[in-house]
Image: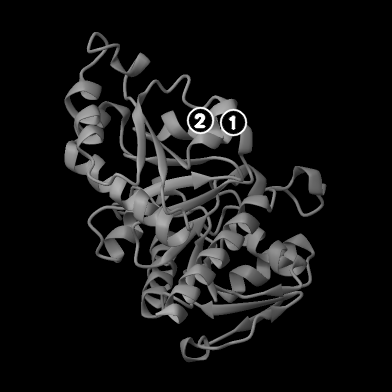
Amino acid sequence: MLLLTPGEPAGIGPELVIRMAAQAQSLDCCAIADPALLQRCAQRLGVAVEIVPLSIDRLQGLPPGGAGRLLVLPQAMPGEETPGQPQARHAAYVLQCLDLAVDLCRQDPTRRALVTGPVHKAVINRAGFPFSGHTEHIGARCEVAQTVMMLADDDLRVALLTTHIPLAAVPAAITGNRLRRCLHIIVRHCRERLGITHPRIRVLGLNPHAGEDGYLGREELDVIRPVLQEFADPSVTLQGPVPADTAFARNERSDFDVILAMYHDQGLTPLKAEGFGRIVNITLGLPIVRTSVDHGTALDLAALPACAPASQRARLDSLQAAVAEAQRQLQVLQRQAAAG
């Protein structure tokens, strides 16, 4: 079963969950949210969805919900939402839903997976909760020292060495230990979750032209290249450091399984420029399966009136892709468990 957290109540997460439940013929998902929030959302949209509250002890072995039916593990929200206007008082509720979902997945990691909707980081921080992103928060909840954020569509996977930190802090964060651990996590994910026994990874440089032999920066010479040269697994193909401005050439993408970028926008800008709306965010290095949408809360879309045409509303593609990827990974884990 997939556990869904809709995320920010004032954003598009609740709407996407409701619309997906209305369209799906069979949905092996349970939302962790306030049932009243989801019911209000369905009413605003004019969508007929039956909200079915559950208790935690009924999650085990529960059959998928049918068309127009959404299973919900209730969590109380303090007061109603205003679409498009996030409120700091809802931050604790958002984190409560997320933490419960993570804990439940950890209890049964081969039969439960987590799919997360978008949250509003600034609102959570304004409420007094240090929060840099789902990836980091879930990693800490799972007591994992390092996780890797990877986004993927049908023909490109991009992993990030650093994630939600200021650009000025990136060079100091690129260390040999971080890069080694990141590469090992990517390799393990390729083998255990993707069935790729001989991973091929293209590693980007930090600086323009990958440092131009030190004239444009020394991170490539002092950190990145030495780690790649000493990597001890001969069954892994590593290429780099590669200049980022040529690394995403379409005619070379099939030569590599993963591109590893040094920082957030370096890797995600080219990926989202082509595939935004159908990309899946995957967290590597966790003891559980976690996927997410590739977009934010889209407060402007959440605030649209119910009469707005479908062409103006948020697309379901990314959530549907995240659900499909989580289901695929769970099936891989279940086959591995059955094989001993």
**Which quarter shows the C terminus?**
bottom left
Q: Is residue 317 left or right of residue 328?
A: right
Q: Position of residue 12 (x, y in %)?
A: 61, 53
Residue at 48% across / 37% down in the picture?
A: 256
Q: Position of residue 102 (x, y in %)?
A: 39, 69
Q: Mark 2 = which residue?
A: 269
Q: Which mark is residue 70?
A: none
Secondary structure under the numbered disc 2 in the rendered image: helix
Q: Position of residue 277 (x, y in %)?
A: 63, 44
Does residue 112 appear in the picture of this structure? no
Q: Are marks 2 and 1 in contact (CB under 8 Å)?
A: yes
| 175 relative to 285, above or below | above
Q: Mark 1 = which residue?
A: 273
| Outermost front residue | 234
Tell me how many marks there are: 2
| 122 relative to 102, above or below | above
Kind of residue at disc 2: Thr
